[in-house]
Amino acid sequence: MSDDDIDGYFSTARVSAREEAIELPPDDFRANLYPVDSPQFTQVRGMNFEQFAQDRYRAPFLRELLEYWDGLYREPFVGVTSDGVVREGLYALPEGGRNDPELVAAAERLMGLLTPGERDQLGHPIDAPQWRAWSNPEFMVYRIGLRLECLADEKVEAILEVVRRSLSPEGYQRVRQAMELNGFLGRLVELPEILNARSYWFAIFGTPSQDEPWGWQLSGHHVDVNFVTIGGRELAAPVFIGAEPALSDDEHPPLFAARERAALELAGSLTEAQRAEAVVYDSVLDPRMPEGRIHPADERHLAGAFRDNRVIPYEGINAAALDARQRELLRELVADCWLLLRVEQRAAQLDLFDAHLDETWFAWYGATDGSQPYYFRIQSPVIVAELDDHAGVWLANRLPARFHVHTTLRVPNGNDYGKAYLAQWQGRQDS
């Protein structure tokens, strides 16, 4: 263990302020592979996912973190806000819509393959608090639903068919690529029992129906998707997708290349005056950051697991101060964040974004020329989306680098998990 290690996986270097610029390591993540006989691998090699989780729980840092997360999980849901006050009337649920019958059929087929005990473990009420129990570490915080790697292939394929039917083709591809990258990482570090393409939990909320609201949750290392369909309106939020390594090879292409390209073009196009507003911090480890702004696990991203009620003040530059091309790039970034949704549902989210364009803010941390790791956030009354370059956990880079990326997506002001839509739907049933 190095002097700056917190527990063998997390280090103080990732949160320590630095006056000097952070130099990017070579894009080839293989230059940052630990030897496979490193202690953090050998001491857990041969463990299954449950044994690994129990081993990790013994770390003092994690015990404190899990206790804190548990407290957040048990808070009543409010929703992410910019000032602690939920803004009402942002989300209108259309009347008369019905849920996709082919998606319902896929879910019913899955249920038919499961044993009674598996169905009990899989299913939760539509308003169950377990929606909020998702987390992105490779060890479990809570166990919600069924673990894919513990199921027969036919049942896993049926789960993935529900996911596929729910999402756009390109969105499903992104989710599957992230899952496969987790398996790739497991092979790199020779820990396939802990990191694999089926290291995920799947749960269903509500009863699959064309008329009743229902949804599902896929949760695990670097892939967390919460999907709900209510009266024909579909929403995927919160979403957390990441990758380590995010820069890979031909077999495993980078997940966020298009988003990063558009973000760097937007950041690089800023005038000096615009940059003075948009660039909140000159570095992702800027000494000017207030105490606590960077977390050893979350680093800079604010909207991750258990942050359902977080107050995230606006910062950066208002979209009204951007030129036409810059606003196009901003919308392109938002469209990529909503990639998981099918085209018509994505269009509805973009219409909502357009309606609040003058209330949208773009914040950037780091150099704007791509020479350093960076963080950015897009935030308005109807979206919070982040991308953050991280230090290594399974790779050896002690400082943030471009080959460990976390992205988050939230629907603020009370509509994560479709809760604002669900309240409207329930109100109509009661009237």
Image (spheres, rainbow, N blue to C red):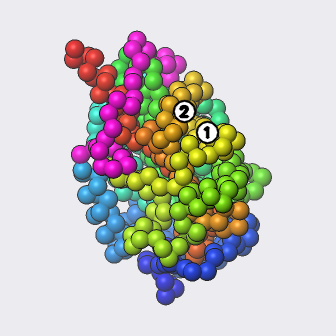
Relative vertical location of residue 11 with respect to residue 374 in this rendering, above or below: below
Q: Is residue 338 left or right of residue 225?
A: right
Would residue 92 be counted in the magenta stretch?
Answer: yes
Residue 4 visible in the picture: yes
Q: Is 69 within the magenta?
A: no
Query: Residue at position x 54%, y 28% from top?
Result: 351
Tag 2's secondary structure?
A: helix
Q: Which residues are magenta?
A: 76-104
Residue shown at 58% from the left, 74% from the top: 399
The label shown at residue 232 is none
104 or 369: nearer the eye? Answer: 369
Q: How far apart are the alpha carbons under marks 1 and 2?
A: 8 Å
Residue furthest to the bottom in view is: 3
Of residues 128 and 296, the one drawn nearer to the viewer in this rendering: 296
Q: Is residue 75 left or right of residue 293?
A: left
Mark 1 = which residue? 331
Residue, x 67% and y 54% (percent of image)? 270
Crowd tier of the residue under label 2, counting other residues whose Cα lies within 10 Å: few below 14, some 14–19, many 20 or above: few
Residue 54 in the image: above or below residue 85: below
Q: Residue 398's spot in the image, x, y percent?
A: 57, 76
Q: Sequence order check: which comes first, mark 1 or mark 2? A: 1
